[in-house]
Amino acid sequence: MISFLKNFFQRYFYDDEHYAALFFLIISLVIFYFLGDVLAPILVSILIAYILNGLMIFLEQKGNSRMLSLTVTLFIFSLFYLSIFLLLPFLSRQILLLVSDLPQIFESVNTFLSSQLNNYSNSFSSNQLEEALTNAFSYIPILFQNALLQLNSGFAAVMNALLYLIIIPFLVFFFLKDKEIFIGYLKILLPRKRDLLSIIWNDLNIQLYGYLRGKGLEMLIVTIATGLVFYLQGVNYSIILAILVGLSVLIPYVGAILVTIPVLLIGLFQWGLDSSFYIYFASYLLIQVLDGNVLMPLLLGREVKLHPVLIITAVLIFGGIWGFWGLLFAIPIATFLRAILVSWPTKIESST
């Protein structure tokens, strides 16, 4: 064991810069772990400013002045930010409505499935089928109610938290306007010799910005398209379903499977096996197919190298540690760790 550790450190930590980089990374992770909740507004603002900075740079490259690029970027951010808070009261009302209707929804779906199984199954008695379905569905309404109530209380907290409402736009503005000043402060904290950290940052910047830009646009397009299609069909709780479908793109494969459950339940409760249900579910499947085969490859491209298993693992781990904020920062942290693993040189590589 001692021999293994000795060889490991000789291979990966053969320069003082490596120890300095490791120290900086450990300190950063410790601060995030213990002060993550306190620093959440700052971290969210940095993440938003980082995404918007790409838009501002794009506008500057098109020949616009820095001030005009900053103004247009902040205007777009303000519109999006205000639209979220205008939407929250409607979403909160739909959540409360859905919570009150959940027992009826599951009772209706349970009755429907019982009748279907009774018609097509001769292997079990009706009592056995009814008992099995009752056991299977008994705990689901409680889970959904708790999840929706927590979601609603989270939205209500955001609505009532003037801290987030005021501070995040304020911080985003200054992070964009004075980014050179903050980068200068960061350089003071970093070691003089920072070639390794520069390599890690360059890889992280390419991967992270590509992923956040692509996933952000994908979520927005899928949410708007789903909400519009469901609204035109008169689907109950269309806003909730649209947001769930949009959020599901964050977790490859698993997200689509999980969100299909409430989509099916609400559709069966509203229409049963009527033709409207088939049209509704076919439109949902079409959105999923177009997203997976057209939208996602188009927006993400080939430069993003986050494997679905890595994404799912990051969401489970950091979501378990920090809850909602862990889910929000799971992908950036996973991208950061991947950049370290890929970019960290070995003694053999440096000698060739």
Image (spheres, rainbow, N blue to C red):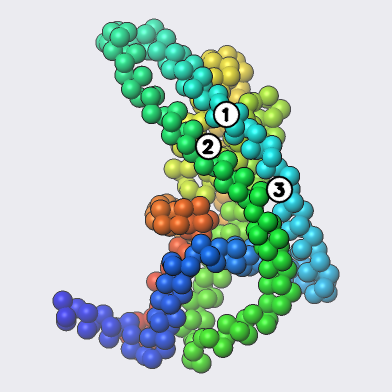
> Quick one: label 2, few (<14), some, or many (20+) residues within 10 Å?
some
Height in image: 209 above or below 229?
below
- Residue 148 image label: 2
> Quick one: label 3, few (<14), some, or many (20+) residues within 10 Å?
some
**Rendered location of residue 302, percent (x, y):** 54, 59
- For marks 3 and 1, give the CA distance: 20 Å
- For marks 3 and 2, give the CA distance: 18 Å
- For marks 1 and 2, give the CA distance: 8 Å
**Rendered location of residue 347, percent (x, y):** 33, 85
- Residue 85 image label: 3
Q: Amino acid at mark 2?
A: Leu
**Rendered location of residue 37, percent (x, y):** 51, 62
Can residue 228 be seen here? The reply is yes
CB atoms of marks 1 and 2 within 8 Å: yes
Which comes before the other along the chain, label 3 or label 2?
A: 3
**Rendered location of residue 329, percent (x, y):** 51, 60
Q: Which residue is mark 1?
A: 98
Instruction: Give the residue drawn at x 80%, y 63%.
Output: 72
In the rendered view of the protein, which quadrant contains the N terminus? Answer: bottom left
Instruction: Give the residue drawn at x 51%, y 31%.
Output: 262
Q: Amino acid at mark 1?
A: Leu
Residue nearest the observer in this picture, 193 or 163: 163
